[in-house]
Image (cartoon, helix red, strand yellow):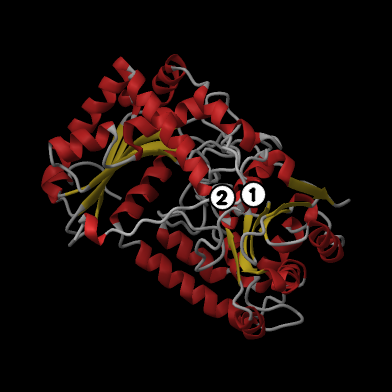
Amino acid sequence: YLTEENRTVGHFIPKTSGASNGTAAGAASLYPADGAGNERRGIQFHHEPNVVAKNSTAVASVDPAAVATKFTDRVHRAELATGAVMLVLENHATPTFSMRGSLRAGSYFEPLEKPGLAQILAEMLERGTNKRTKLQLAGDLEAAGADLGLSADAFALNVGARALSKDLRLVFEALAEQLMDPAFPEDELEKLKQQTIAGIQEQQTDTRYRAYERFSNLLYEPSHPYHATPGDELIKSIGSITVEDLRALYQSRFGGRSLVLSLAGDVDTAAVDKLFAELFSGFTGPDDVTITDSTAVRPTAARREVVSMKDKASVDVLLGLPAPLLRHADDFYAASLANSALGESTLSSRLGLQVRDVEGLTYGINSRFRSPSLVSGAWYVGVTLNPNNVERAIDSTLEVLRKYVDEGIREDELADQKSAAIGSFKVGMATNGGLARVMWNAEFFELGADFVDRYEQLINDITREQVNVAIRKYFRPDELTIVIAGDIPELAGGPVS
């Protein structure tokens, strides 16, 4: 099939001349994958949620006329007296727009005895306001082919939307209504609780999730935002949530002070500013939006536990430890590049090439920093394998890790990872959704208005010695917590949860 005579070739010819300076490109491959942080003390899913709109796909390419323009010069920023921020980038390639946004109202702020409350609150915002029922809201959006979705993570309520440009007011009015005038209908709450509990029960049958759940319990105290509440406790908490609980969290946390909306597409900046001020000027509070790094981390010590799960064909193993890495850290990029070479890709990283390709011990293996954002998370290696290969895979993984710590990254590896990070960053901003995301990231994490223009240089400036320092700092093979989840009775001599 892959023959020359079957090939179709397309050429893109820009309307304007001039080479790209690299500034009009890229979603952040080194960003936390879903924004503010994807772990929460309440409902947790192993795969990060897509924080753009539900069922969203790429909708538009960047206007080629703007490729050679500095990104900073194209972004308009407006701030209301309440503190709410609106970012706008006009891109007239197609008659569409995408929006990304957040306000600080995630599980970090929910009562310790009510895990899951923030996520339930986020989903209840979509289930009716004092002006429109859930079906009326959904019908109005669907009639226009518009998507608008809300979700919660550890630190924020996240907003994602996309629509035709002519429906800008429709989407903004629906969002303002959901954020500022929710009804919290009791019948919808009961339905949502049952659906959520069913999802948690299903989640408890997944070996990778159960491994991570136990792993996080060993690393963090219950008050830590990345502590995963055990399934039975979470189900009990979800079942106990009342409309009064929702209203209490809403009244204490929701307000425009921390609201950030970023929009890219075929829009008029002045019209967006006017609409934003009209709808959100009265959205005030809360007084405190501070998020500080948590100290509720259990003492680091090498340990090993087994989560016994019957009738599972494969086993998941996590090996890791707490990693004091924040998004603002000076060594954030060095640490990210260090991890990329070690295990970001199952197919091309050191771990993948040795444990998977050479030894054939695993179906998949990768390493990652889990949400190094406003609060530091964990670093770990995840391995999926046959139960008979557990010990050999652990030994092989530790051998690769120790060699990496001893020898450091090679110059050619570092060059490859830099190229991959910059390339991914550039490709990601080829859509309105990518443009909106990168603007939101820069604002939320206070990276500076010129962050996109500086990104390539930030990566290229990282030295081999900086990466090697990060490797020794964050990858400590003699302090790893190891959790094995699956049907492995021969290993059941250790602690079992």
The amino acid type of the residue labelled 1 equals: Ala
Binning the other alpha carbons within 10 Å of mark 1 as few (below 14), some (14 to 19) or many (20 upward) gives: some
Residue 10: horizontal and vertical position, in percent? 41, 56
Q: Residues within 10 Å of mark 2 (few under 14, many from 20)?
A: few
Distance between the alpha carbons at the discs numbered 1 and 2: 7 Å
In the rendered image, which quarter is residue 245 located in? bottom right
**Residue 108 appears in the rendering:** no
Looking at the rendered image, the quarter that the N terminus falls into is bottom left
Which mark is on residue 65? 1
Q: In this view, does 376 lie to the left or right of 164?
A: left
| Identity, as a three-letter code, of the amino acid under mark 2 | Pro
Residue 50 position in % (x across, y down): 50, 58
**Residue ID at (54%, 60%):** 116
Residue 143 appears left or right of 224: right
Regarding mark 2 in the picture, which secondary structure is present there?
loop
* x 86%, y 60%: residue: 281
Residue 344 appearing in the image: yes
Q: According to the image, label 2 marks what residue? A: 14
Taking the image as shown, residue 369 lies to the left or right of residue 477, namely: right
In the image shown, does 451 or 22 lie closer to the viewer? Answer: 22
Q: The residue tagged with tag 1: helix, strand or loop?
A: helix
Q: In which quarter of the image is residue 247?
A: bottom right
Label 1–label 2 contact, CB within 8 A? yes
